[in-house]
Image: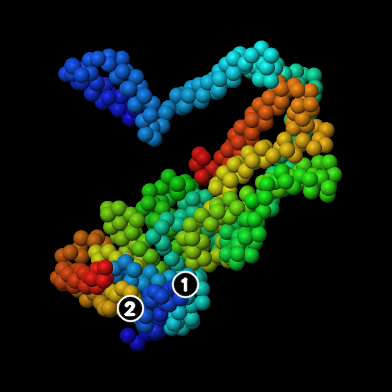
């Protein structure tokens, strides 16, 4: 690809506990505009750490991250983030939650309202726009967070196991909703997951992480998808090459879990 | 609904055991009834209905008054005036209000409690919230503030009297000292309990630090802060009498000290009763205000 990457990590390393734990070593990657990339790997492999460094919530011990050529120095609204924990604010109604992010961008009152309602409609929460999230299910709370982040129109959407706390059925519904939203308005998405099926369905490209120290074990282009994204998750299972890829990822996952299991 | 079905199941069970007519159980013919009642009463984490809750609360109060009353009548004639009966204390209370301007004392005490408490809150809330947000500030201030919590507030009374004399200022200062350090510690905890994801979500949306503190941390911690305030104003009431002992012309505590000099135990107990009732009313007031100001937090 001749196009300059949107996100570039150069020899990024991150230590915790004064170097006692090496979460990441020597990670260099380029992430391209409007691609969906999944960071996949077993728990504790540093994939979340890398995502947080891109978000500007953590700082690398070594190396640097640039977005559009500029070094990341802290969090900012052009890099929206969705967390695994529910972050919809309980003291604001669904609509006010979405408006909160727009207020930060100094968007006028009338525009805020219109834009908030538009995005609540996209995540199918317009009927409960003036309800507090206390009475919402986990999936609804996560949709508030999704609407709040997307309404800010970020160039990059970072997701840290966004559907990890949801039950299985709601999880695939949310995955399909995410594809629908990104297809409607293309964005660069980086999602962290340890769910192989989720990574295969959502991503255009999978980066597989090893654990402790975390580094990239494999960079998989998912050619079997032929550059397509699918409305329904089950469409994926019909593709030639899907099972092979799934098996390959399972094998890599076992390998990674195994290395730590042997130590114990 | 769930209660009913549980009851039906229990009944069916007892019927079956009755039908089997086990010889070993026949001897204790009245025991199962008591056991069934006690099993029902002590059901783990079972929530009684509103009416039962109210009745049980009243029953508890009646038991307390009964023990008090029994204590009075079981005391030998000569000592009875040192433990007056319930009706004597209530009579004393009515007389106090009717003839001795006790209402003025109550108002004076309430003003002292609320003035000193809101002064303490005005210091403790910003201090607790800021320490909860900025670890360096906590490291700077918290060790010193924690030390103050271990000093009994009452021991400051002589010092406050030297500084301010037997004035209202001295009393307010004591109530303030008794509350402010604990309240700060509680609000620090409340603030630190705010999920860091809330803060990080706001930061990734581009919020400023100031915006995070004011628009995220404060509202997120507000329900817990209200609970802390509600609990600490109760402590304020417990310091009231100590504050009003010395050189007070008015207030519930002053009345009780005067009554103590004439051995009017009924008036002393009327004072204690008044403080108890006012404390409960303050608690209810705080709950109502919290519900009005923070409707999203649900009933607490």
Q: Position of residue B77 (x, y in %)?
A: 66, 12
Image quadrant containing the N terminus of chain A: bottom left
Relative vertical location of residue B33 with respect to residue B125 in this rendering, above or below: above
- Residue at horizontal 83%, vertical 47%? B162
Residue B184: where, in percent of width, then height? 63, 52
Count the labels in the image: 2
Above or below residue B187? Residue B259 is above
Which label is found at residue A210? none
Q: Residues within 10 Å of mark 2 (few under 14, many from 20)?
A: many
Q: Is residue A145 visible?
A: yes
Q: Which residue is mark 2?
A: A215
Q: Locate residue A204: give its quadrant.
A: bottom left
* Whether residue A244 is situated above or below residue A164 in the rendered picture: below
Q: Which quarter of the figure has residue B52? A: top left
Q: Is residue B292 left or right of residue B4?
A: right
Q: Would you identify the image quadrant in which residue A27 lies? A: bottom left
Q: Position of residue B288 (x, y in %)?
A: 59, 37
- Badge 1: residue crowd in 10 Å (few <14, some 14–19, many ≥20): some
Q: Position of residue B103 (x, y in %)?
A: 76, 26
Query: In the structure shown, which secondary structural element does the residue marked by tag 1 occupy?
Result: loop
* Residue designated by label 1: A58
């Amino acid at each position: 690809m001749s196009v300059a990457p949107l996100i570039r990590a150069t020899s990024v390393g991150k230590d915790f506990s004064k170097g006692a734990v090496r979460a990441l070593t020597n990670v260099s990657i380029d992430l391209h505009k409007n691609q969906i990339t999944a960071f996949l790997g077993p728990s504790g492999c540093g994939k979340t750490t890398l995502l947080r460094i891109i978000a500007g919530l953590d700082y690398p011990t070594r190396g640097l991250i640039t977005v559009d050529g500029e070094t990341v120095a802290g969090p900012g609204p052009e890099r929206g983030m969705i967390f695994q924990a529910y972050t919809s604010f309980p003291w604001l109604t669904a609509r006010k939650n979405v408006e909160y992010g727009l207020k930060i961008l100094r968007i006028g009152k009338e525009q805020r309202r219109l834009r908030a309602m538009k995005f609540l409609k996209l995540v199918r929460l317009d009927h409960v726009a003036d309800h507090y999230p206390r009475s919402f299910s986990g999936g609804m709370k996560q949709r508030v967070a999704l609407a709040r982040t997307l309404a800010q129109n970020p160039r990059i959407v970072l997701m840290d196991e966004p559907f990890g706390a949801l039950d299985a059925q709601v999880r695939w519904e949310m995955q399909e909703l995410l594809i629908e939203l990104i297809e409607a308005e293309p964005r660069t998405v980086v999602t962290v997951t340890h769910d192989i099926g989720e990574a295969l369905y959502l991503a255009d490209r999978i980066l597989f992480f090893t654990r402790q120290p975390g580094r990239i074990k494999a960079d998989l282009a998912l050619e079997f998808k032929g550059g397509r994204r699918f409305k329904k998750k089950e469409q994926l299972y019909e593709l030639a090459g899907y099972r092979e890829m799934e098996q390959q990822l399972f094998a890599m996952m076992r390998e990674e879990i195994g290395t730590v299991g042997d130590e114990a | 609904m769930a209660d009913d079905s549980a009851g039906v199941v229990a009944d069916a069970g007892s019927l079956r055991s009755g039908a089997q007519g086990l010889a070993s159980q026949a001897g204790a013919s009245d025991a199962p009834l008591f056991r069934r009642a006690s099993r029902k009463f002590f059901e783990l984490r079972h929530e009684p209905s509103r009416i039962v809750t109210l009745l049980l609360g009243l029953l508890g109060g009646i038991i307390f008054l009964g023990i008090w009353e029994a204590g009075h009548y079981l005391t030998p004639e000569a000592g009875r005036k040192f433990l007056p009966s319930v009706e004597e204390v209530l009579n004393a209370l009515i007389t106090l209000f009717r003839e001795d301007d006790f209402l003025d004392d109550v108002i004076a005490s309430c003003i002292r409690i609320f003035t000193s408490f809101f002064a303490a809150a005005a210091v403790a809330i910003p201090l607790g919230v800021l320490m909860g947000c900025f670890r360096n500030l906590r490291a700077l201030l918290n060790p010193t503030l924690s030390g103050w919590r271990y000093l009994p507030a009452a021991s400051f009374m002589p010092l406050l009297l030297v500084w301010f004399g037997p004035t209202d200022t001295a009393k307010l200062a004591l109530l303030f000292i008794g509350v402010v350090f604990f309240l700060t510690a509680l609000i620090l905890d409340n603030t630190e309990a705010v999920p860091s994801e809330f803060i990080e979500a706001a930061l990734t949306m581009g919020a400023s630090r100031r915006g995070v503190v004011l628009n995220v941390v404060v509202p997120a911690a507000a329900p817990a802060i209200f609970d802390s305030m509600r609990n600490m104003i109760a402590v304020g009431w417990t310091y009231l009498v100590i504050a009003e002992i010395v050189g007070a012309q008015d207030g519930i505590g002053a009345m009780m000290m005067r009554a103590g000099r004439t051995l009017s135990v009924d008036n002393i107990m009327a004072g204690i009763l008044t403080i108890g009732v006012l404390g409960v009313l303050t608690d209810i007031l705080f709950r109502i205000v919290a519900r009005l100001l923070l409707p999203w937090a649900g009933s607490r």
